[in-house]
Image (cartoon, grey):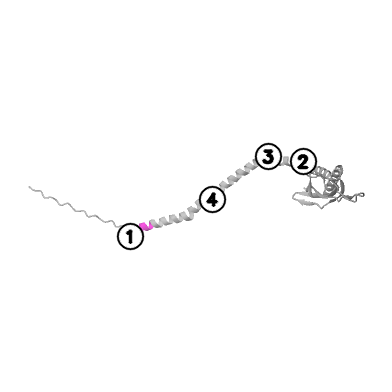
Amino acid sequence: MLLKKKALPVIKNKKIDLFTPELQQRWLALSILIVVVIIIFLIVILPLITKKIELSEVKNNFVVKLQQYERILANKDVVSTNMANITNEHKSQGYFNSQETDALASAEMQEFIKKAIVDAGGQLSSTQALPVSSDDNFNKITVRVRMTGNSEALRAVLYKIETSEPLIIIDQIDIRPMRGTRNRMTRQIESSNELNINFQAVSFMRKPA
């Protein structure tokens, strides 16, 4: 007996429609949500992140400066001691005139130069105190000197002045040979070893505090 085959039901593929009004509304809502999130990120979150980075950099700079100031303060006593030592060293070396007034300092320098010329065998023609000039924290005491003497006397005077205490500096020196004298017997002019010497001597005083 032959069995009849049953016909199997044919299942057709059902096409899913992605563009139904319901799905379109969902996609639109999702897109709007994404746009809103991006806008919130750009307007609120990103500036906060940027500001935080800036504040972090500022904080780091303050920390570095604070560490520098701490190192400076740690060395404050050493620096103060060194400055005091330098000041005392300058005072002990006697570079500056210690007279109370410019006039006294000028008179002291003129007397010192006069003695140096006489001791060297020269002759002092004149001394003249020039107006005091200021340079930073110091007053310059200047004396113009005219003298005569031979080269040995000049060398001794310059050495005495330049090794003096307080410090004296020679400035604008002018050296000229003196005119020789005429021999009465030969009527010839004999050369002279004497020199006419003009120079300025400069000393320094601290300005009153």
Label of residue 78 in the image? 3
- Please give the range of residues in magenta: 25-29
> Would residue 145 appear left or right of 12 to someone viewing this image?
right
Residue 143 in view here = no
Q: Which residue is drawn at 54% across and 49% down?
A: 55
Mark 1 touching mark 4, by CB under 8 A?
A: no
User: Residue 174 lies in magenta, yes or no?
Assistant: no
State whether the magenta stretch is mostly helix, strand or loop.
Answer: helix
Distance between mark 3 and mark 4 Cα atoms:
37 Å
The residue labelled by disc 4 is 54
Give the number of the mark in front: 3 or 2.
Answer: 2
Residue, far left: 1
Q: Which amino acid, by three-letter code, is at mark 1?
A: Pro
User: Residue 28 lies in magenta, yes or no?
Assistant: yes
Q: Residue at x 42, y 57 (%)?
A: 35
Q: Which amino acid, by three-letter code, is at mark 2?
A: Gln
Mark 3 touching mark 2, by CB under 8 A?
A: no
Camera-side residue of 36 and 148:
148
Mark 1 and mark 3 lie on one chain; the one further toward the N terminus is: 1
Give the number of the mark in front: 3 or 4.
Answer: 3
Mark 3 touching mark 4, by CB under 8 A?
A: no
Element on which disc 3 rests? helix
